[in-house]
Amino acid sequence: MNFTSFKTREHGWAPFVWLVYSGFFFVQPVYDHFSRTQWLLNGLGFVAFLFFYLGLFLLEKPRGIFHVVGMVVLGLLFLPSNGGASTFFIFAAAFVPFAVETQKRAIAGLLIVVLVAGAEGLLLPKLGWGHISSWSLFYAAIFPLIVGGSNIFFAERNRMNRRLRKANEEIEHLAKVAERERIARDLHDVLGHTLSVIILKSELAGKVIERDPEQAGKEIREVEQISRQALSDVRDAIRGYRSQGLPAELALAKSTLETAGVAVHCDAATTLKLPAVQESVLSLAVREAVTNVVRHAQARTCSLRLEQQNGCCRLEIHDDGRGGQNLEGNGLRGMRERVEMLGGTLNRDPVAGTRLVITLPLKEVTPKGEGCT
């Protein structure tokens, strides 16, 4: 009698199939030709058993344990007059492991059922309150131990499966949250930078459209190209491809700063070989930093420096703007998260302009791995 699906809501016909075992309750009344009154009492007892039995499939823990206790009480009441009542102890023992939360409680509950049944079988004859046959005592005390003991294993397996399902659901939830955060960070970096460039070029085109239509047309065509590239970048960000490469990003940063009227000094080792993940993180860092310079710094000059030091790559972006702001916006927080996940460091000094220094290990690392010193 295996009640491994006790905790589920969809049981099919299984509960009714298991009820076949309860038929032993009527063996003695048939063979001993019970009176009408005895049949009535035993019938009422069986109805009570059905109430406890079916209720176990509807109730959550810990309320189900009260139905198990009800079965034990029925066994105590009917066993002296009907040896088939031992089946109530068997059902109670079978359900105990599924009606409690831990294996220790299941073992304790099973032992209580067995001890109660055994005590009744041994004490009643001594007290002169009736006689219980050896077979009835075996079915009431020993058989529940066998059935309940096997179901302890199945119940523990069910608990482990539930824990695994819960852990998998949590992992899936965290993965979805992480993916949403990644997309949010990437869209912020992609669109923030691109829209800033579009605004700059649109303003420039508006200023020169009357005196230099050719230059204005050039700026408008570049706006169109940038817009198309932005659409492609958004699609790539959603798919997880974050950058076209660090050299291309540095060239775009130089062009953007010059368009904004910021003098640029770029000293970057563009031939530096970087793992794909590190290159993507540095590319997005360049994009975010340059966007901040254009939007907020009011700088006249900006320098970009990329070099290799002690097995790490070091990116430094320094402008002579107003600085002085210590609060980190969404873009800078996202940048810091990416860098730290790869074992790197990000330092920002807002004195005398803003100096942003990012250091990343050159080797492939796992998230939160060994960093640079």
Image: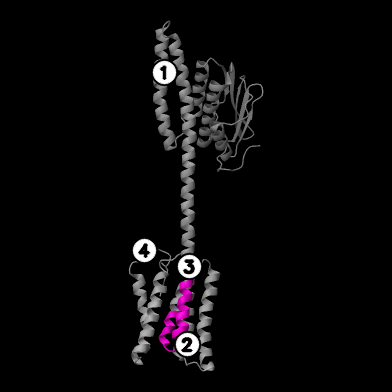
Residue ID for mark 3:
63
Q: Main secondary structure of the magenta part?
A: helix
**Where residue 81 appears, x then y in whole percent?**
43, 89
Residue sitting at x 50%, y 26%: 249
Pair 4/1: label in front: 4
Residue type (three-letter) at the residue carrying disc 3: Arg
Q: For numbered disc 3, what is the local secondary structure?
A: loop
Residue ID for mark 4:
10
Distance between mark 2 and mark 4 Cα atoms: 35 Å
Residue ID for mark 2:
137
Residue ID for mark 1:
222
In the picture, residue 302 is in which quadrant? top right
Q: Residue lying at the far top in this picture: please name it.
A: 211
Compared with 238, 89 (above or below) is: below
State which region is magenta.
63-89
Pair 3/2: label in front: 3
Distance between mark 4 and mark 1 Cα atoms: 63 Å
Q: For numbered disc 1, what is the local secondary structure?
A: helix
Task: Tell me which numbered mark, 1 or 2, is placed earlier along the sequence.
Answer: 2
Density class for disc 3 (Cα within 10 Å; few <14, some 14-19, many ≥20) is some
